[in-house]
Amino acid sequence: MKARSDELQVFVSVIECGSISAAAEQGGQTPSAISRTLSRLESKLGTTLINRTTRRMDLTEEGRFFFERSKAILAQMDELEEHLLQHHQTPSGRLRINAALPFMLHAIVPWVGEFRALYPQIQLELHTNDLIIDLLEQSTDVAIRIGELADSSLHARSLGCSPLSILASPAYLEKHGTPQRVEDLAEHQVLGFTQTETLNYWPLRHAEGDRLLIRPSLTASSGETLRELALAGEGIVCLSHFMTHDDVRTGRLQALLVEANSGYRQPIHAVYYRNSQLALRIQCFLDFIQQKLAVYAC
């Protein structure tokens, strides 16, 4: 059996206090409990640490060696605990965030300055990827995922949700006209996603339900690319509010078929590996970004 830190503490305390009774009083224990701990420690080590008589205690040669090493070990443990406590109280360290490019540009980047001012000891690393990544392989602390989750090996925290809107630029509408009914989309240039077919279901009520599977005439892998295409007048898109709210507010994009919109909102989650206790730097980021996302959420 190996010696425990509490046994080392008792041993050091007895030597520093000069007697078992003094160490017991200082530690709030009985002398017999202290004596038993010393005996157990010596039994584990297979050697005598203290020669004890009724009047005095003397360290053996092994005891002097063990006493110096024990003090050093306990000091290192105290230093480690203090460091971890300070680390817990003051968020610090590297924080690697991964998100799709649209979310990174429109929902994280605008708030980076404020976050860094609040938590100057956190070193942000921002990575973009429109595909689902392996967090361990990419050394990622937190990934932001838009839409429904299916990965049960990860812990997920909801950050809110964001409405989807059907949008086009004034230039496109002037040239091609404004669709008045869902059925009118068949006569228009519809822009969609390449990889995920579920992203090409638009939240529009029609004769067969609340979602319409569109057949895009032009596709892109990134929502940011689709946004730029829509701004350039290339067609009609369905995109999330978090990345288009400024475009709508300034008139660069116009919402279409509002009355037919079924009101579906995309869930937004932060995902990370399950830990017994979430690192403070991650907790601070999640709390911060959730508060900022409230302006886009339902």
Image: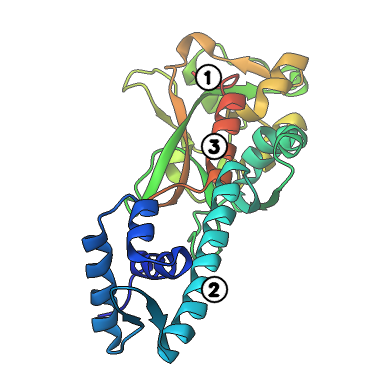
Mark earlier in primary sequence (2, 1): 2
Q: How is the rendered protein coloured? A: rainbow
Instruction: Using the numbered discs, state the Cα–Cα distance from disc 2 to disc 1 in whole angstroms.
Output: 79 Å
Earlier in the chain: of badge 3 and badge 2, it is: 2
Residue 221 visible here:
no
Q: Residue at x 43, y 67 (%)?
A: 18
In the rendered structure, the answer to whether residue 145 lies left or right of residue 103 reads: left
Q: CA distance from mark 3 to mark 2?
A: 39 Å
Does residue 30 appear in the picture of this structure? yes
Q: Earlier in the sequence, mark 1 or mark 3?
A: 1
Residue 55 % position (x, y): 33, 73
19 lies left or right of 254? left
Residue drawn at (63%, 23%) of the image: 167
Q: Which mark is residue 205?
A: none
Q: Give the percent coordinates (x, y) of residue 136.
A: 48, 64
Query: Quick one: SS at disc 1?
Result: helix
Residue linked to disc 1: 184
- What residue does disc 3 label? 286
Q: Quadrant of residue 38?
A: bottom left
